[in-house]
Image: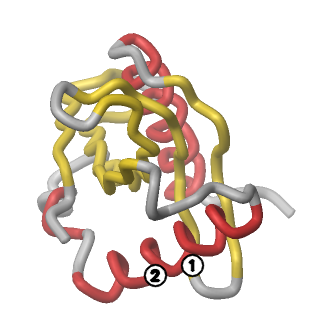
Amino acid sequence: MSKTKKQDIGDWGEHVATQFLEEHGYEIIDRNFEVREGEIDIIAWHEKPYFGKTLCFVEVKTRSGEEGSAERATGVEKIGRMKQAAIAYCLRHTINREDTAIQFEQVSIYGSPKGLKDIRQYEIPL
């Protein structure tokens, strides 16, 4: 089954976000982790100034035109599903959540395969 234009742009955005994170010292360990409870686009380790080695669960939002702010697209419901998927990931990979620094982040990609306009990254407050 062929992908829609929106899916193609989303795949491109995830690729761009992965490259961006790697350029900023992230070690990508998984992509598109999906369980019944939710889905996480990118999972990576990153050395944070205050917490040291941190397991980062990253949501990627791509906007190709004027369809609104990518930052506002991750609401409370999506964050809840991300948290459930993160728990499932840690359980599946025997990661002790009590001893591991964990952070939720978003990378917003603005543009399309025809041209990248902007990349924004921020921590999702819980």
Residue pushed farthest top?
Answer: 23
Q: Nearer the viewer, residue 62 or 2?
A: 62
Snapshot quadrant of residue 68: bottom left
Mark 2 lies on residue = 81
Residue 36 vertical position relative to residue 94 in the rendered view, above or below: below
**Image side of residue 30 versus residue 124, left or right:** right
Note whether residue 75 is visible: yes
Callout 1–callout 2 Cβ contact below 8 Å = yes
Snapshot quadrant of residue 56: top left
Numbered disc 2: secondary structure: helix
Q: Residue at x 30, y 24 (%)?
A: 116
Residue type at tag 1: Gly
Q: Residue at x 74, y 56 (%)?
A: 93
Residue pushed farthest front?
Answer: 99
Residue 38 bears which disc, if any? 1
Residue 24 bears which disc, if any? none
Q: Position of residue 71 (x, y in %)?
A: 16, 58
